[in-house]
């Protein structure tokens, strides 16, 4: 399973780790992903998704069904 948020599409960002001597080495800045079981009211069941913490905050404002439609996800495939 890739390190990608299933609702927002967030993924790793390329960056540099800069040492004290200002030497730069490449590093990946991963998204803060959490495996969550969320209640889906329209389907009357739990759905297991891998979400970023930003997506979890957005779920408080929008419904799960609205975010899934925007992302183009079929929640039937993610039932627990």
Image (cartoon, helix red, strand yellow):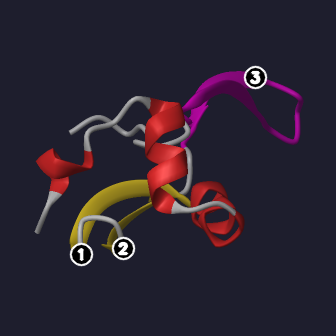
Judge left or right: residue 50 versus residue 69.
Answer: left
In the rendered image, residue 52, in percent from the top left (x then y), is placed at: 53, 55
Give the Cα distance between marks 3 and 1: 50 Å
Mark whose residue sits in front, 3 or 1: 1
Query: Quick one: which residue is furthest to the front in this view?
Result: 42
Specify whether 61 is left or right of 10: right
The percent position of residue 18, horizontal first and vertical second, equals: 80, 34
Q: Nearer the viewer, residue 60 or 41?
A: 41
Give the foreground label among 3 and 2. 2
User: Which sits earlier in the primary sequence, circle 3 or circle 2?
Assistant: 3
* Residue 11 appears anywhere in the view: no
Q: Is residue 58 left or right of residue 47?
A: right
Mark 2 and mark 1 in contact? Answer it, CB < 8 Å: yes
Residue 41's mark? 2
Q: From the image, tell me which residue sits under label 3.
A: 24
Circle on res. 22 = none
Which residue: 53% across, 34% down? 70
**Contact, mark 3 vs mark 2 (Cβ under 8 Å):** no
Q: Is residue 7 visible?
A: yes
| In the image, residue 30 above or below residue 46 | above
Between 60 and 17, the one lying in front of the other is 60
Among the two numbered marks 3 and 1 on one chain, the one whose residue lies closer to the N terminus: 3
**Label 1 residue SS:** loop
The N terminus is located in which quarter?
top left
Helix, strand or loop at mark 3: strand
Q: Which residue is drawn at 70% across and 26% down?
A: 15
Tag 2's secondary structure?
loop
Q: How crowded is mark 3: few (under 14 residues within 10 Å), some or many (20 or more)?
A: few
Q: Residue at x 60, y 64 (%)?
A: 59
The stretch drawn in magenta includes residue 69? no
């Amino acid at each position: 399973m890739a390190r990608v948020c299933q609702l927002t599409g967030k993924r790793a960002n390329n960056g540099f780790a800069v040492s004290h001597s200002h030497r730069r080495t490449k590093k990946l800045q991963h998204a803060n992903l959490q495996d969550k079981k969320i209640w889906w009211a329209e389907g009357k069941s739990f759905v297991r998704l891998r979400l970023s913490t930003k997506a979890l905050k957005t779920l408080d404002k929008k419904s799960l069904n609205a975010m899934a439609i925007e992302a183009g996800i079929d929640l039937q495939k993610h039932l627990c």
